[in-house]
Image (spheres, rainbow, N blue to C red):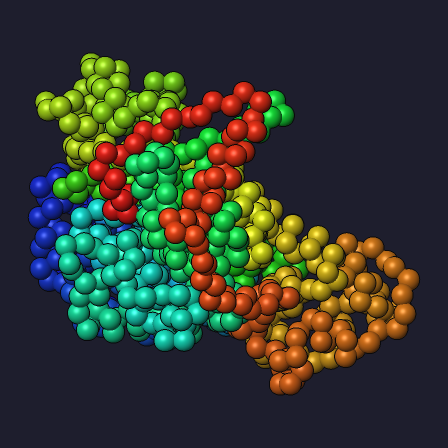
Amino acid sequence: MGPPTKGVSTDDLANVGELDDQTLLEELNHRYRRDLIYTYIGDILVSVNPYKELPPLYGDEIGHRYGKAKSLRELLPHVYALGSRAFHNVQRHEGNQAVLVSGESGAGKTEITKMLVAQVSRLSQWSGDYFLQERIVQINPLLEAFGNACTVMNNNSSRFGKLIELIFSEEGQLLGAVITEHMLEKSRVTRQGPGEKNFHIFYDLMCGFTPEERQRYFLAQPERYRILDPGHGQPVIPTQAAFAAYNGDMENLRRIMPIVGFTPQDMDVVFALLAAILHLCNVEMAVEPESDEVMVMNEEDVDFASTLLSVQAEDLITVLMANINWVRGERIVYVKTLNQAVDGRDALAKALYSKLFSWIVQQINFMLHEDETRGGEHYTISILDMAGFEHFQVNSFEQLCINAANERLQHFFNEHIFSLELQEYTTEGIKAPKIKFSNNTELLNMLFQRPMGIFSLLEEESSLAKTTDMSFVEKMNKQFSKADLYKKSKHRDPVFGIAHYAALVTYNAAGFLEKNRDTLSSNMSSLMENSQNNLVNELFTAKVLDTGTLDMRYLVNELFTAKVLDTETLDMRYLVNELFTAKVLDTGTLGMRYLVNELFTAKVLNTGALGMRYVVNELFTAKVLNTGMLDMRYLVDELFTAKVLDTGTLDMRGGSMRGKWQRPAFNQPERRHYAPGDSLSRQAGRKIRQKMKEQANFVDIPVTSNPNFSSAHFK
């Protein structure tokens, strides 16, 4: 396209006299054929994914040209113009800014979001913290590795929604950022549709691990793992080019994670949890014909998973095979059916991944944390990027959730663009123009209304024992028999249709109940809470918000205040974000005089007497204790680790994020020796039955046998 200049065709379709669907499509098509992929419609920017490389359209030079433009329409329509306008509005103190990125799957929302963040960061470099801006730009590949996957529509589809809030001072200086993640498609961890893949990170590990790392995490060839194997004898990594791409992504992650703030210990534990999920999902279970009990068929994967999770293999098998509940002070033990055992295994794998993803986002937020020491009013530029409307050949539970969220978004859009505008006309006594727009309130009621909306019915069916996906569809057919927006299937299949604002979508309800239940038993949670792995323990003890994500405030308060006081050591993330200023980040070094002045405040300097407990309480609770003199060598050793002492400088980009974590020793599990016909799961089964017999009112719970004695491996 070359350097941006004013176009000769219609850059803003709001200026077209009669704008209907046909005119809109013709004009967009006309511009698309000329490689003009951006078009304005008033304040709205329409972007058409070119699915090809275009002439130089992005970069610093073009970004700065849009940043210096005096008006939005001085140059060709561009995503940079939108980012520049938001940034300049903040500089002019025109309030907080918001950019909504919406569209169908594969429309290019993720790329547009990255360009918006890059443009705003580029403009803020004129006055701001360079390393902070660099981190904000670098987080995208990390989030994509853990939150994106290959679908039938898009090879890099975002399987979660995110809100990025960039925080600025009154002068327009970038102070920090906060990322909020929503609706991670965690069911993808254990099950993918035809032609789809798991999250990118699993393939990155398989192609990017060294032989030593494969041995450390007990990993074999990727085809061995159920959640990666495409089946039908197809390879997981089909071509050398695909291998090189995944390997390159892994190398990029190794470079980015330290910049964002992950230590080698953090990265080691993250990789261990991902490997544990692979081994856990590989655990096969079947029903033994003689006893009708669920048996674990491949205990080697149990050993590997339990080692990486730092729990006992016997305990892991027990929670997979049985539930232990307390009723009025009595312990009640229930043996699981095959389906319940498989659902429990998958629920644990999904919980591990979703909590790990939330933790990674939380770690990023600590490194991008706003400098609260800066006074004055703060402004934000918020960028919402969420999964777009999806309409595939086979649509399941995930598509229903995504499309329902987009219906909410559409309603908000209609409410603010049309309804409120018409109200303003009426208030000012102006004759309102006749505007036709679709009001989806009726559909939202059908989806969300309690107690008889679709999601309420799904919750009800999921809570009952003897229900099926077909019974759920039948209940909807009866409830919405007179609803125009609900389409009943003419066949005896668990299928139904919904007339969305974008299109009529047919949903296959097979698996709806299983995916919606996603019930992690209290026994499994308790086992993870008692893990010897610090990260696993934290993931399952942290509070969870209604959205299913970890409560960041809880982690801030619990992990980086009370824990610090208990251990009398400081966490580098808290130190970097709360105590250091931009000056230190700019220089990348830390002088002793600066350390004393900034960390301990004037009051501490005046006392001349300071001990470690005093430091901890002074920094975190402001409580003053009477202690001896300050040992500066001890302080430096405690706060910054030996690496800082050796170099004499502090690299803020790679600052320690977890003070006293030690590298776990994932030793090879010892081989067990059993009597003929015995196994670890049989031993666990005997213990479970013994506990059941010790119950006051023991009733041997029958287990439905599987006549085919088939493995649940590919269930």
Please state if 611 lies on the left or on the right of 146 as rendered.
Answer: right
Q: Is residue 60 above or below residue 233?
A: below
Q: Is residue 483 above or below residue 81?
A: above
Q: Considering depth in this image, is 306 or 562 the residue closer to the camera?
A: 306
Q: Where is residue 226 shown, x and y percent of the image?
A: 28, 53
Q: Is residue 686 above or below residue 366?
A: above
Residue displayed at 58% across by 56% down = 532
Please state if 271 lies on the left or on the right of 72 as rendered.
Answer: right
Q: Indicate the quadrant containing the C terminus: top left, top right, bottom left or bottom right.
A: top left
Q: Where is residue 213 shown, x and y percent of the image?
A: 41, 72
Q: Considering depth in this image, is 26 or 621 the residue closer to the camera?
A: 621
Q: Where is residue 188 shown, x and y percent of the image?
A: 31, 48
Q: Considering depth in this image, is 354 or 124 the residue closer to the camera?
A: 354
Q: Considering depth in this image, is 692 or 138 the residue closer to the camera?
A: 692
Residue displayed at 20% across by 55% down = 230
Q: Indicate the quadrant containing the N terminus: top left, top right, bottom left or bottom right.
A: bottom left
Residue displayed at 66% across by 75% down = 641
Furthest residue toward bottom: 647
Residue displayed at 32% across by 39% down = 288
Q: Is residue 161 visible?
A: no
Name the quadrant containing residue 220: bottom left
Q: Is residue 562 visible?
A: yes
Furthest residue toward front: 676
Please state if 583 lies on the left or on the right of 84 as rendered.
Answer: right
Q: Where is residue 514 shown, x and y percent of the image?
A: 32, 35
